[in-house]
Image (cartoon, rainbow, N blue to C red):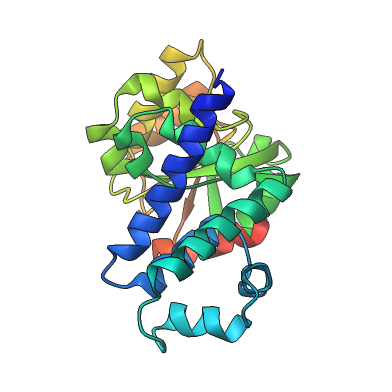
Amino acid sequence: MVNALSEDYLLYEIKAKIAGDIVFSDNPGKAMRKWRGLFNISQIDIAERMNVSASVISDYESGRRKSPGSKFIKRFVDSLVQIDVERGRPALNTLLRLFLGSHKLYEAILDMREFSKPISIKEFCEKVGAKLIVGEEYEDTLLFGYTVVDSINLVLEVPSYDYIKLYGATTQRAAIFTKVYYGRSPMIAIKAMQAGMGGLKPALTVYHGTKKVDPLGIEIAKREGIPLAIVEIKTVGELLEKLRNIA
């Protein structure tokens, strides 16, 4: 349990992390757009909170304006946090959980959200264009959120005891692995999660980056009773955009 003092400190650290990422980015506008997307806040909403026009935000994010100054960035970050707090802190709660994990875990996770209302595996796959190749009998199972990870960073860099934090608020979620080439390493990660959590496993596993899954990966999914889907969206960015339209 995080006490009030340590949580305030972590919030300060989160703000500093976001501001630093924008300030030191080669493309500050692109970094602003990334963080606004992670907080799931529209240009109009952030502009209203900052008392500027939406076109100002759009111009910065598109590069039509020069890099924003430090005062503007501070207002931008403060506004992200304020709006999220008013919404019940969905983004901040995720970031706090990640900050309590290792730095490597934070780097491996590309996005992590809870849905406003649960959706079935079948509906989820339809919305992101994924094909269920194992576990069709589970297509009516409900999902309450998703976690997107860089599978290479996760397996090579993140200690297995931190895997539990990938689940967010619930295990009833889609675990989405990018940069998957053969389909073995994600299942190794899931096996490690199960070992550390008494057999708990994600409700759905999704591979992005492969068209043909290694037979061993399919066999593990079948034996462990883990629904497995593949998605052939071209880029990770496009995948994240589709996912955020669900949340």
Instruction: Write down the quadrant of residue 138 in the picture.
Output: top right
Q: Position of residue 26 (x, y in %)?
A: 26, 70
Q: Which residue is painted at 54% across and 39% down in the image?
A: 94
Q: Residue furthest top?
A: 198
Compared with 172, 130 (above or below) is below
Q: Nearer the viewer, residue 234 or 101?
A: 101
Q: Nearer the viewer, residue 128 or 92?
A: 92
Quadrant containing the N terminus in the rendered view? top right
Q: Which residue is painted at 56% across and 43% down in the image?
A: 92
Q: Nearer the viewer, residue 147 or 62?
A: 62
Q: Residue furthest front?
A: 71
Q: Residue furthest right?
A: 117
Q: Which residue is painted at 52% across and 56% down in the image?
A: 38
Q: Is residue 240 visible?
A: no
Q: How many marks?
A: 0
Report the side of 34 relative to 215 (left or right). right
Q: Position of residue 99 (x, y in %)?
A: 42, 34
Q: Which residue is painted at 39% across and 28% down in the image?
A: 101
Report the side of 173 relative to 215 (left or right). right
Q: Nearer the viewer, residue 15 or 232?
A: 15
Q: Position of residue 127 (x, y in %)?
A: 64, 60
Q: Position of residue 234 (x, y in %)?
A: 40, 67
Q: Residue furthest left?
A: 156
Q: Is residue 115 visible?
A: yes
Compared with 63, 182 (above or below) is above
